Image (cartoon, coloured by chain):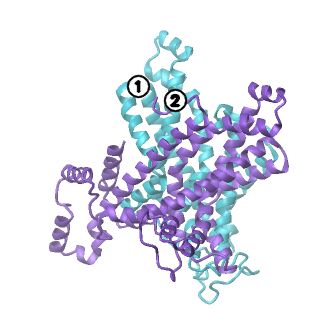
Chain colours: A cyan, B purple
Amino acid sequence: MRASPLATVAIGVVAIWLAAAAAAPILAPYEPLRQDIVGRLAPPSAAHWLGTDALGRDILSRTLHGARISIPVGLAAVMLAAGLGAVVGGLAGFVGRRVDDVLMRVTDLMLAFPTVILALVITAALGVGIRNAVFAIMVAWWPTYARLVRGLVLAVREREFVQVAYALGASDGRVLWRYVAPNVVSSIVVLATLDVGHAILTFASLSFLGLGPPPEVPEWGSMIAAGRNYLDQWWIATFPGLAILSLTIAFNVVGDSFRDFLDPRLRRL
Amino acid sequence: MLVGITLLTFVLSHAVPADPVTASLGEQAAADPAVVAAFRHEWGLDRSLPAQYGIYLWNLVHGNFGVSISTRQPVWLDLRQTLPATIELAVVAMSLSVLIGIPLGVLSAVKRDSVLDQLTRVVSLVGTSMPIFWLGLVVLVVFYARLGWAPPPGRLSATLAAPPMITGFLLVDSLLAGRPAVALDALRHLVLPAAVLSTYNLGILARLMRGSTLDVLGEDYVRTARAKGLAEGAVTLRHAARNALIPVITVIGLSFGRLLSGAVIIESVFAWPGLGLYAFRTATSLDFPAIMGVGIVVATVYVLANLLVDVAYALVDPRIQVGR
C-alpha cells in the first residue's frame, strides 16, 4: 500500500495522538485535576504552555489526558455500532422474508431520526456519563451498518460459490461463516474506519451539551463547554477544539485512503 | 412511518429507569408520596403503558400533542413557536452549502489538480471534520467579542420588539409588518449560526459534486457536445453539471437529518430559541409529551424534505416523473 503524502501525514497525526494518549501521565506537565486558584485563567506562558482554565488547571495536561477518553470512546462506539449493525443486517439479508421486512422497517425508522436528538433522549433517560454516551452513539449508528451489510449479504447470497456450497451440502451456518462473512467484512471495516473520526466528533458534541463525563474529567467537549463563559480567555476552548479537529481530520484522511486501498467500490459513500 | 416514530419515541422515553417525577419535582418533593401520587395522576403516569400510548395516539389524531411537563404549555404551541426558528436557520444554512458547495465542486472538477481544486479538497475535509460547537464559539469570540461586527447570541436584539407572529419566520414576519430594520437585525443574527451550521454539508456537497462531475465529464455525450463545437462553459453547465447533480440531490435530502442534529448544537451555542434548544431542554427534563412532539415533527420534516428531493429530481432530470 503506497500512501499519498497527505495520508502519510494523517497516519503520523493519528500515531502522535495515540502516543500522547498512552503517555499522557508522563508527558503532561501537571496533574489534569490539580487546581490552582491563584493562577487561574492564565494565558499561555512558559509555565503553562496552553494556559490555565477557570480553576487554574493546566490546559495542556487536560488536553493530553482528553485523548485517553476520546480515542477509546470513538473506537468503542464504532465497533459496537458495526457489530450490532452487522448482526441485524446479516440476519435480515440471510434469513429474508418477514425477518427482513421487520428488521429493515425498524432500521429505516432509526435512520430518519437525527443522531443528536436520539442520543439526547437516550443519555437524558439513562443518565449522563461516558458509557451512556457511547451506548447512545451505538443506538443511533447501527442502522447504517445494517443497511450496508444487508445489501452486501443479499448480493453475495446469489453468487455462484454460495450456490455451489449449498449444493455440496453445507449448512446455513457454514455458508454464512465461511463464504458470506469474509466477503462482507472488508466493507464493514472500511466504513468503520471512516466513522471513527465522526464518532469522536459526535461524542465531543454530546459532552459539550453536558451529556458526557462529569465536568472535572478532562474531556475535550466539556473543556470547550467550560470555555463558553470565558470568551475573552480564548485559550480555554481553542486548544481542545484544535485537538478534536486535528484528530478527526487525520482519522478521516486515513479512512479515505484505507477505503481506496481496500474497497474502491465504496468510493461513492 | 409516523406511527412508527411515535411508537419509537414512546418506547424510548418510557423504557428507561429514569423517573420524570424526580426530574420534574426535584428530590425533596419526590420523597413525599402524596405529592408523587398527585403528580403521576395529573400526567396520566399511573395508567398502564399501552393505555398511556393509546391515549396519546387518540389525542394526536385530534391534533392534540398533549401538554409539556416542563413549560406547562400545550406542546403544539411550543412547537409552533420553536419550529419556524429552526427552519429559518436550516434553510439558510442549507442554501449556503448548496450555493457555495456545488459551484465549488464543479469548478474544482473542471480545473482538476489546480490550486482551486486543492483548496476545495481542504475545505471539504476541514468542513466534514469540524466540531461545529467549537467553531461556533470561535466565531463568537472573533466576530462578537473581539471585532464587535456581529450581534450577541439570540434571534433579535433586545432593544427591538419582535413583529407580530404570522409565519414565525422573523425575516418574513418583519417584512410583512413593514419593519425592514427588524428584518435586517434578524438577518444579522442569522448569519453566523447559519454559516457555522452549513460547514459540514458544504464539505460533503463540494466533495460529492466534484466526484460526480469528474465521472460525468468522462461520458460520451460530453465528448459529443465538445465535438459539436460547443463552448467549454456550455458543455460544463448544460451537459455535465446538470447530470452530475442527480446523485448529489439524494444526499441533500438525506443530510437534512444531520442538519437537525447540528441545529441542536448550534442553537445551544447561539442561544437560538428553536426546536433544537427545545429538544435539548425537554429531553434533559424527561418531558415525554414534548420529546414525542419533537420526534414527530422531526420525522415529518425529514419525510417532507425527501419528498421535495423527489420533486427536484424531476426538475433536473426530465426522464424522471413525479407520481409515477
Looking at the image, residue B58 lies above or below residue B311: below
Disc 2 target residue: A151
Q: Secondary structure at mark 2?
A: helix
Residue at 53 percent of width and 11 percent of height: A164
Give the chain of mark 1: A
Closer to the chain start, of discs 2 and 1, is 1
Task: Please tell me if label 2 and label 1 are on a single chain.
Answer: yes
Could you tell me residue B256's position as x and y percent?
52, 50
Q: What kind of element bears circle 1?
A: helix
What chain letter is assigned to the residue under label 2?
A
Badge count? 2
| x 72%, y 54%: residue | B123
- Front tag of 2 and 1: 2
Using a 10 Å C-alpha cutoff, classify the residue at mark 2 as few (fewer than 14 neighbours), some (14 to 19) or many (20 or more).
some
Dividing the picture into quarters, in which one does residue B239 lie? top right
The residue drawn where x is 43% and y is 61% is B83
Disc 1 marks a residue whose amino acid type is Val
Residue receiving disc 1: A95
Quadrant where the image shows the N terminus of chain A: top right
Which residue occupies the extreme bottom position in the image? A38
Quadrant of the image occupied by residue A37: bottom right
Compared with B158, B52 (above or below) is above
Residue at (82%, 43%) from the top-left corner? B111
Circle on res. B8? none
Task: Find residue B95 and report its horizontal and vertical position in percent.
Answer: 60, 54
Q: CA distance from mark 2 to mark 1?
A: 13 Å
Q: Going by the image, does A102 lie left or right of B256?
A: left
